[in-house]
Each structure stands twice: as C-alpha cells, then as structure tokens.
Image (cartoon, helix red, strand yellow):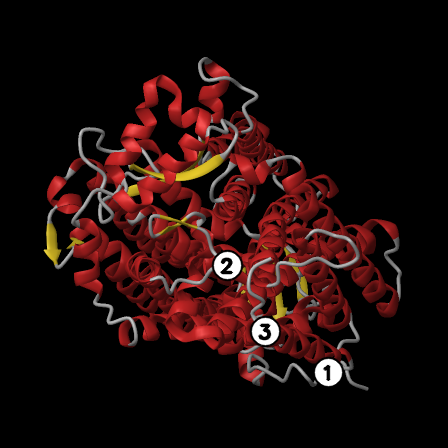
Amino acid sequence: MGNLNVIAIVMVIAVTVFTVGLAIFVRRFTRTTADFYLAGRKVGTIANASAISGDYLSAASFLGVAAAVYASGLDGVWFAAGFAGGFIVVVLFIASALRRFGEYTVADFAYGRFGSDRIRLVTVVMVLLTSLFYMAPQMYGAGTTWTVLVGAGIFGLSPYNTGVLIVSLIIMFYVMVGGMKGTTLNQIFQFWWLWTAMFLVVVFAFTVGKFSYPDALAEVTAENHRDVRMVSVADLTADDGALLATAEGAMSSEAFAAVEAAVEAGDPEATIGILVPATNKLHELRDMFFNEPGHRYNGLDQFSMVLALVLGTAGLPHILNRYYTNPSGAAARRSTFWVLIFIGTFYILAPIAGLAGKLIIDDAWRAGTAPTNAAYVDGLLARSDAIMPTLAQILGGEWLMGAVAAGAFAAMFSTTGGLLIASASAVGHDVYEKYVNANASEARKVFVGKASVLFFALVALGIGIGIPAVGLDKAYPALIAMMVTWAFSLGAGAFVPMLLTGIWWRQTTERGAIAGMIVGGGGSLFFIFMNVLKQLGHLGDSGVLPFLGSLTFPTLFTFPAAVLTIVLVSKIDGQLPKNVDEIWMRIHGTASERHEKELGLDKVGGMFSGGQK
Amino acid sequence: MANSGDTVVRTGSGVQVQHGNHIDTIESVDLVFRAQRKLSFSYGLVFFVVTLAIPAMSVWWKTWYAVPVWGGFTANYLFVSLLYYLFLWGLSWTYIRKADALDERLSHMADEIAAATAVAPAGGE
C-alpha cells in the first residue's frame, strides 16, 4: 500500500456525499416515468449541454486521453478530436429529428418508425450490449483508481474489488433515488468539476511547471519516442540478449544499471521495466517521433479509428436518450452546439496535460520528487493511465491530486449513471411497459425502472470484478480506452445506420433496418471478440483468424456493410409501413413545434416543477 | 402514431396532422424534409471530407505530418490538437443558424401550403 492521500480521499468523499445528497433532494420531484427517464422534458439548453457533456466524459476522457497522448503522441491526440467530432454527426443528422419524434428511447424510435415489436426487441438487445460494453471500462476505472488512491480493501476484498463494489453501490443508490432529474443535476455538477480539474492541471503546468506548448513539443520531439515494456528476465536475455542491448541503447546508464542488476540476480521469472525505441507503424522507414502519426495505428487503422470515433458518438444510447429531454428540436441543436464548446475546450486541455506530463514527471523523477505511489521506468510512468493524478500531485500537491481523484470518480459516476438510466429504460420502459404490464400505474412503472437500475448495477459490478479474472487487464496495455472504443464501434455499427436511414430515407423497411442492425452490431461484436481472443493468445500468429482478430476498429467495414444491407434488403422487401406518411410527418413535421411556439410552450420550465404535488 | 395532442386527419389526397391552428400536410412536410436534407448533407459532406482528409494527408503528404511549423508543432499536430475544434465550432454554429432560419422560413410556407391543401379536421383520431 502506498502513501495514503488523506486530503484527496476527503475530497472524493465530499464529492460523493454531494452526489448522493443531490439525488435525495431531487427525489421529491420525481413522480412520473417522464420525470424518472426524461427529467420531465424540461431541461434547458445550457443545463442539458452540461449534462450531456457530463454523461459523455467518462474515465476514458478524463484519465485516458491525457494518458494516450503521454504514451502515443499524435495518435493519442486523435482520441480527443474524434470524441468531439462525433457530435457534428449528432447535430447534423440526428438531434432535432429524434427530439421531434418525441419518445423516450432509441427502441421507441425504432418501433415508431418501423412499426414492429421485433425491431424494438432487437434494438433493446443492442442498447443493453452497448451500455454494458461502456459500463465495463467505468467499473475497471473505479477499481484501478481506488487501488492508486486508497490501496486497501474492505471485508477481505482486494483494493480493486473494493473500488468496484463501492462505486457500484453509490451509483446504484443515487440513480434509483434521483432518476433522470437527479442524474441530470449530478451530471451537470460532475461535468463542471471535471472541466475545472483539467483546467487547473493545465494552468498549474503553465505557471508552476513553466510549460510552453510549442517549446515542449519541440523538446519531446528532439529524440526518438520510447515505449515502456514490462518483461521477464528470461525474455530479456533470450536471443543472445538482443532485447537487453536494445534497452541499453534507449535508457540512461543509471536506469539501465538497475536492469543489469535484475539480470545478474538470476531469477528468470522476475519482471522488470525497460524502455525500447518506438516503431513507426504508418511510415515504417521513419523513426517514431511524438509529434508524428504512426505510434499506434497503421494506414488502415488511421481511417478506421477516425470513423469509429466520429460515428460511434451518434450510436451511444445514453447520449441519444438525453436528446429527448430537450423541450424542442431547435433546442436539441443548440444543446449540441454548447456540448461542442464545453467538451471541445476540455479536449484541447487534455492533450496539453499529456504533453506537460511527459516533461514535468520526468523532471520530478530525476530530481527525486516524483510521487511514490506510481511506478516509473527511467522517468516514464510504467502505466500511462496514472498520468493525471501523478502530474496533479507534482504540480499542486495533495489538493490538486484530490481534485483530480474526485474528478475521476465524478467521471465514472456521471457516465455510469447515464448508462444505468439507458439500460433501465430499455427494460422498464421498452419491455415491461409495452409487453408485460401495459396498464401499470405510474408508481408501478417507476418502481420497475428502479428495479432495473438495481439489476444492471449488479451486472456492472459482476463485469467489473470479472475483468481481471479473465485476464483482460493483462491483454491490453490501455484497457480503459480500448473498451470504450468497443462500445463506440458497437454503437456505430448497430444504431447509426438504422437511425440515418430511418430519418433520411423514406424507403427504409423494417426488415432492412433489422438486417442492418444485425450486420452492423453483430459484425462489430464478432470482430471485437476475435480481437479479444487474439490478445489473449488463443488465435495464434498467422492465418485468417489472427488477421480477423487484428482489426482494432471494425467500423470501417461494419458501418458501410450495415448501410448497404439496409438499402439492399429494403429495396428487395419493399414493405413500407401502411402509415408511412404519418411516420414521416412525425419525424419531419413542424406543426407541433409551431403550435408550442405560438403558445410559448417551447420555453424551458423548471426541473423542479413537474412532480411535486 | 402521432404525438400526443395531434389530430390526425385522413383525406382523399393523403394525411394531415393538426396541432391547434397549425397543420402539417404531406406536401408541407416534404418541403421541410427536402430543405433540411440538403442543408444537413451539404454540411455533412464538408465535415467528412475535412475529417478524413487529415488521416489521408497523414499517410501521403510528408510536409503535413513531418515538417515543424511552430516550435514542435507540425501542421498535422496543430490541426488535430487545436484548429480542428475551431472548424467544429464554426461548422456547427453556421449550421444551427441556417437550420433555425430554415425552420422559421419553412414554418410560414408550411402554414401557407397547409391552408391551401387542408380540409377541416372532422373525424380525427
């Protein structure tokens, strides 16, 4: 167990208590299903933009983007740009149409647009899969952050499992109690905490750390980029010590002396960190520099990554559900613009933190002042995911470290809260209210929503605990970012083609949409599992299967395949819903909004006015 | 099928939806849809051309990805880390302004078209 960060722990507890208190305060205003799932459709533009941003910024954004830049330079910066760019697809093609359609969930849209129970159930399954894929990295982040921050477990549990358990219970409680209103208010608070914490780290870097953006970039680019590798002594000495010689050329003499000492100790199973020169996967004949592309992705992956990130955002159910909380289609567009401002500024800051960490952590390590809770290899962090708390502690002591640690938990709370609402609405609203008990009272419906939250929080808990058990944490060096990318890929394959064609191509049929969802969603699942199997070492190194498992981002293939499938099957099928005119008028008609505007009903009300009686 | 508060009327020439004094006919909705589609897909084309041009230039244009233009910034790094956001903000701002203006203009036209083609809402559901 490392040093106990008392101030940081107190700040995390304070944020948690505030979160729970807010949910309890909002409880009295949640009476109906519209309150529980949609905050009464009365969330204003800036408030909704803040809540969407809080919903969107997960552990992957708060901890993962700076870490990706720290580890991979320009290829890591793309995570930030791609996460932001995804909202352009939302605002151009989906936001106002989805709101005008005026339902609760993505599955409602599918049912209303195509008119069959079959497509609603297929959509529910895809919503649940996407949500679970997105919940997994949040739970993993909870366990790892708890391990770094506290380093101790309770009731005989490991620190990792303790973190997963405690975060699951807190989120379960506040979502069950507060519903969408409580979650919305918490997401607003949590987003601004995240934004402020990131802003403070960057301000401290410029002031305390004497950081200059262009000069720092020139400094880290002056020499070849290096990677950290954790290897066994046996691997290090294999092939006549080829790896050892490579490490000697990449490391300082002081750091390499520690490697030599481990080798001389003679334990072949001992693990030690070394540095090796990074290779350029894009331009194989060039050295790899921090400010150039190619550290993580080859030519195909460069395009596929961009597509996965910008299309995936429009396929995240918990983000799409938030668009129904806007009072009008125009308000949905304006919310998205403010989301782009809020998260755009955040994503400009995160890569600065990643680059600043490169120099400031190295300087602190060489001066002997770097925090001892993190592990280092010749001045580089052994695990890049630790960059935010480590950099914060160097620049601003325990207070800034506390702000960052609380921000990490806030990121997990806000995103997982939104995912639980999305999952609960898929089961409680899309299945229970439609197929199990259509005549249920409002109180009964809200009860089922809360029971669904309880169920999925327990599923998330199981997933979080199961990740290390199956060895996923060892198979992927940057697991949080990887798992988030899976959720993006699944959403981009399953939902975006259906939504785009459903909104913009009148000839889309129910069979076409289902076929497209199965091809896009199923194809994404197939490639993801092939990739997992390959990383776990079950597919070997040559042949067709390892090739299929090597696709990091399947969207380049699954998205066009799904669109093509929808078009072809719809053309062959030709069975449009009998009331297709009504459906089309519901998506693109504006009489409702004109009427509401005339009566002044398009204005935002208060989130605290709906449920209290 | 329609939203709550809708009055759906089926006529010999098609379906219309009425909200208070405002009516959507299939002709007026088609007008709105076509204009919105043109606007959204024009902006979408610009977005995807610019966004996919970045990795394309990263693959094929050395001056873009390897030549410093400001301190350690290459044009590639500068665009992805800073300028891309200006592009996103500018694109979304101009799109939203045009979409709002389009909504405003089309709402008047929709009312005019509806007035010319609508029938009295008898027998609505």
Q: Circle 2 marks a residue in which chain?
A: A
Mark 3 or mark 2, which is nearer the start of the sequence? Answer: 3
Q: Are the numbered discs 2 and 3 placed on the same chain, yes or no? A: yes
Q: Please tell me whether mark 2 or mark 1 is closer to you in this view.
A: 2
Q: Residue at x 26, y 39 (%)?
A: A250
Dot label at residue A25: 1
Q: Amino acid at mark 1?
A: Phe
Rendered position, A379 above or below A341: above
Q: Are marks 2 and 1 in contact (CB under 8 Å)?
A: no
Mark 1 or mark 3, which is nearer the start of the sequence? Answer: 3
Nearer to us in this view, A36 or B120:
A36
Rendered position, A158 above or below A170: above
| Left or right of residue A366: residue B114 | right
Nearer to us in this view, A161 or A186:
A161
Q: Residue at x 43, y 43 (%)?
A: A308
Classify mark 1: helix, strand or loop: helix
Circle 3 residue: A6
